[in-house]
Amino acid sequence: MIFTDRRWTSDELSLYARDYAGAEGPARLPVIAIHGLTRNSADFGTIAPLIAATGRRVLALDVRGRGRSDRAADPMTYQPPVYAKDVLALLDQAGIGRAVFLGTSMGGLITMALTAAAPERVAASILNDIGPEVAPEGLARIAAYTGQKVEIRNWQDAADYARSTNGAALPHYGPDDWMAFARRVFREGPDGAPVLDYDPDITVPMRAAGKDALVPDLWPAFRHLAQGRKLMLVRGATSDLLSPDIAGRMREAAPHMKFVEVPGVGHAPMLDEPAARDAILGFLADAP
């Protein structure tokens, strides 16, 4: 095991994180890694050890309703402001005053919400294929399969499902890659068949918001995040969620923001790509 299992509590839920200890060397602020809508801490299984090797502790979270974290009794709590409150509870219980945040997709939205709630806790941030505005077609694609019932009989079915929902974003993946992907996003169910490793009710707030959920405007939150902080944006070159236009306007609004585009990848980069990996490690070398 290259990480330790950690738990913390928020709203009486028991929540989970992978805790990667930082290597020896000068003390640096820890990194809090937050995954996307239907994913979990396993998404950071490649980049987190690399960051930890530079001397930074990394806490990769399972957001409530995902992975090894409890599912919420009230599905309307599956929203970024509540997720941000959960992260603050982690920081408090772990004795972390400030941290650098690495947020993929929804994880970036949580970072923006956290900055609005407690700006002093966010020292710097990396947004992975997410911005203050999203392309409606990308979010509609994700909403079309999230929370839907799927019939999965075995791990090959799980790998085929992973490819069907993510193949356009990761065209370079082969059969072994998709099987590894499936092992990250599925778990073994009571009957031995794989089941998706998240609460299908995470979509309840999206359905309740209707069409308004497809076009969130978080530009004020983004400008607040960018103000006085180091910031980097990672974009998949073929992303259908973070369009070139949105990324361009983000760069205009935050001229100091570092930017890297990962070739041949859509939403969202897995951060094991050389372009993403090198940019993140370089950014963190100069971060608090």
Image (cartoon, rainbow, N blue to C red):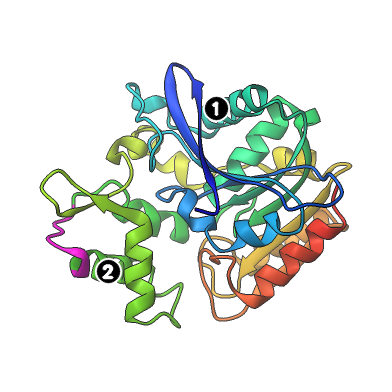
Q: Residues within 10 Å of mark 1 (few under 14, many from 20)?
A: many
Q: Is residue 21 above or below residue 155?
A: above
Is 59 part of what is drawn in magenta? no
Image location (x, y in percent) of residue 86: 55, 27
Segment colored magenta: 150-156
Image location (x, y in percent) of residue 278: 72, 71
Closest to the observer, 133 or 17: 17
Q: Is residue 17 above or below residue 24?
A: above
Labelled disc at residue 86: 1
Image location (x, y in percent) of residue 39: 42, 51
Labelled disc at residue 60: none
Query: Which three-letter amino acid code belongs to the residue tagged 2?
Result: Ala
At horizontal 32% and vertical 50% (from top left) the residue drawn is 146
Q: Is residue 82 above or below residue 174?
A: above
Q: Is residue 231 above or below residue 123?
A: below
Query: Which three-letter amino acid code belongs to the residue tagged 1?
Result: Asp
Q: Which residue is mark 2?
A: 159
At horizontal 51% and vertical 71% (from top left) the residue drawn is 266
Q: CA distance from mark 2 to mark 1?
A: 31 Å
The prevailing secondary structure element of the residues shown in magenta is: loop
Mark 1, secondary structure of its residue: helix
At horizontal 84% and vertical 44% (from top left) the residue drawn is 27
Please tell me in which quadrant of the rendered image residue 217 appears: top right
Image location (x, y in percent) of residue 75: 35, 27
Q: Is residue 105 left or right of residue 56?
A: left
Closest to the observer, 264 or 245: 264
Q: Residues within 10 Å of mark 2 (few under 14, many from 20)?
A: many
